[in-house]
Amino acid sequence: MAAEPASAGRLALRVDPSRCLGCGQCLPSCPRGLLAVRGGLAVVTDVARCDGRGRCLGHCSADALTLGPGSWPPDGA
């Protein structure tokens, strides 16, 4: 399961489940403590609090984290 995107009009953090190793290497990189490993994958625990600045991006050795335009709740949810 991929991380849910942040609020509409903001950048959204996403986890690519095909790349995420569930190692937790990204967890300490979020200054707000919003990343967790659940079900073997990294997830954003509170998307409304994500600032979309991407400080976590360079801390994933599997390159599973990306930022892009998004909305909350996810389309189709």
Image: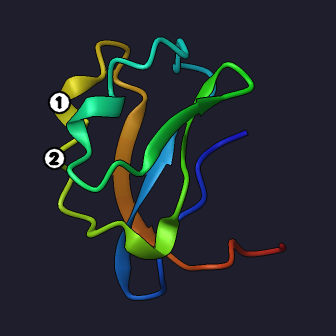
In which quadrant of the rendered image does the C terminus lie? bottom right
Colour treatment of the image: rainbow
Image position of 52 (left or right of 44):
left
Residue at left offset 28%, top offset 56%: 32
Question: Where is residue 69 drawn, in percent x and y?
Answer: 40, 71
Residue drawn at (38%, 88%) of the image: 9
Q: Say which amino acid is labelled 1.
A: Gly
Q: Residue at x 67, y 19 (%)?
A: 40
| Residue farthest front in this picture | 33
Residue 1, compared with residue 14, is above or below; it is: above
Marks 1 and 2 in Cβ contact (< 8 Å): yes
Q: Residue furthest bottom?
A: 9
Residue 10 appears anywhere in the view = yes
Closest to the observer, 65 or 50: 50
> In this image, 76 relative to 74: left or right?
right
Q: Quadrant of the N terminus?
A: top right
* Residue labelled with disc 2: 55
Is 22 on the left or on the right of 24, as rendered?
right
Mark count: 2
- Residue 51 sits above or below residue 36 on the image: below
Q: Amino acid at mark 2?
A: Arg
Secondary structure beneath label 1:
helix
Q: Which residue is mark 1?
A: 58
Q: Is residue 22 above or below residue 32?
A: above
Q: Secondary structure at mark 2?
A: loop
Res 45 label: none
